[in-house]
Image (cartoon, rainbow, N blue to C red):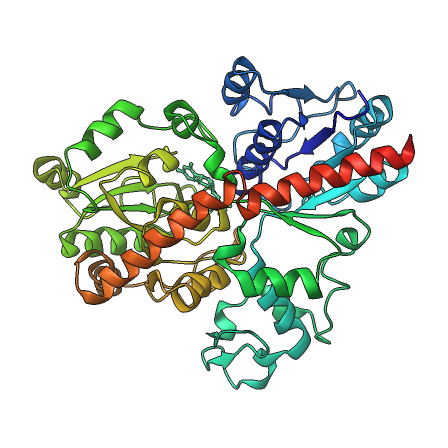
Amino acid sequence: MADEVEMFFFPFMGGGHQIPMIDIARLFASHGVKSTIVVAPNNALSFQRSIVRDQDSGRPISIQPLDLPPGSKPPNSDMSATPFTDTSMLQEPLRLLLIARQPDCIVVDMFHRWSADVIDAVGVPRIVFNGNGCFSRYAQQLIRIYEPHEKVQSEYEPFEIPGLPDRIVMTRSQLPHFHKSQGGGKPRGRMWNSEDRSLGVVINSFIDLEPAYVEGFKKEMAKKAWVVGPVSLCNRNVEDKAERGQQAAIDEQSCLSWLNAKETNSVLYVSFGSLARLTPKQLLEIAYGLEASSCSFIWAVGKIFKPSENGEGGREDWLPSGFEERLKESRKGLIIKGWAPQLLILEHPSVGGYMTHCGWNSTLEGVSAGVPMVTFPHSAEQFFNEKLITDVLRIGVQVGSMEWTSWNAEPGPPVGREKVEAAVRKVMDGGEEAAEMRRKAKDLGEKAKRAVEQGGSSYEDAEALIQELKSRKKVQL
Ligand code: UDP
């Protein structure tokens, strides 16, 4: 049909990238776009049930597994992918699929590093998804240009990022390594070269969250940008929220009945995303800090850093003695060892705070749920997201992380239990400052929901992209 638009979506496996890309595909299907999710064989297991539910409700969405050449091994599909996981075995199957199907565009994750040349050679319009928000991208661009971190004497001397609408102070120790090793301070083209050659970028954010930064990003860095989030809000029913990303390590009913027994806004949800590996020492400090705060909590304990398989740091020596027994008795805390149904938890009325590693998806999910946050960044662009939460939006309190750590390196010294307790108390204890943060967080949560409803900025940006694809089609006919 001349007026029907078909979009391909090519996610990168791994929590913080795959999960939002699947949501983006579902979001465009809800706008009537024929949406096809292109994946390695077996990679659809974690999300196919939500796609079947969308299909059952009449949405034009499907999954297209790629045929791998005999003998080649598909990348892991269990959320163990890291930014360096090689997916180039998908190159030829993707090329053949694009030639055969000629969709109106493909939205591709930037971690498929090889993909730009292949897609551009076939002539299918390419839209890039990099998973970050506008504040972090704009702030990092200004750091590249002005190099304020080169003008300080030590890793811990604060510097201000020049040229931002808000006063943002950081230390070298909080910067990703690539900022320090780059040298020359020139912006990397306009960020990534492949973005420059693309039709544009799709961003998981919404204008009311970071208006000045969306504007700065669009003006200075992006060829074209469609800001269509928070995309997690496309998960409207309990099943979609409970099964997002992976099979949860707790059944949804036990989780909900634990939360139902708690007072409104009384529970802190603690999680550090899909990739971070905390040391047993850090987990111990968190456990002591949580216990001392007297606050009720759900703690999703993800991956644990083990210096060596035989060395210290086995799975069980990261809790104070008798901790779990005390929790069971007092019903103060629930520990989920493994994957948590994060959206279901965050959106429950009993949850009144979120200790987060500030991954961008988690940040947006916290914002959408309207909860104030305790920020505990580790890696990637998380320290920038922390500044957005605490210093721009003023809906969170920093726990005091100072050390940026690569996902595959041993984390630095732990943040102590006193800092954990103090930050939790500031957010959860109900004083004047906490009430103000909560009010602002609730307000932003409402704005997030409005952004994705018809007439909202993200809804209209999604429509604008669809219109653009339709008009390109007409020109070609
Ligand atoms: N997530 C989840 N359960 C978990 C851990 C993570 O559902 O136990 C989801 C979370 O809701 C978010 C994603 O995994 O959508 C993590 O992405 P984010 O960008 O926050 O962090 P990353 O995992 O990339 O560090």
**Can you say which quadrant of the picture contains the C terminus?**
top right
The location of residue 58, given as percent across then percent down, is 57, 16
Does residue 263 appear left or right of residue 211 in this picture? left
Q: Is residue 198 visible?
A: yes
The residue shown at (50%, 81%) is: 159
**Can you say which quadrant of the picture contains the N terminus?**
top right
Q: Quarter of the picture for ligand 1?
A: top left
Residue situated in front as seen by the camera: 304 or 346: 346
Does residue 441 appear left or right of residue 9 in this picture? left
Q: How many marks?
A: 0
Instruction: Relative to 252, say whether 220 is above or below.
Output: below
Q: Which quarter of the picture shows residue 260?
A: top left
Extreme-top residue of the structure: 56
The location of residue 56, given as percent across then percent down, is 53, 13
The residue shown at (14%, 33%) is: 261
Q: Is residue 108 visible?
A: no
Extreme-front residue of the structure: 455
Residue situated in front as seen by the camera: 19 or 414: 19
Q: Which quarter of the picture shows residue 288?
A: bottom left
The location of residue 370, given as percent across then percent down, is 34, 49
Extreme-left residue of the structure: 329
The residue shown at (50%, 51%) is: 360
Residue situated in front as seen by the camera: 226 or 118: 226
Instruction: Relative to 40, say whether 55 is above or below.
Output: above
Instruction: Relative to 20, say whether 53 is above or below.
Output: above
The location of residue 379, given as percent across then percent down, is 50, 57
Q: Which quarter of the picture shows residue 350?
A: top left
Instruction: Relative to 78, say whether 354 is above or below.
Output: below
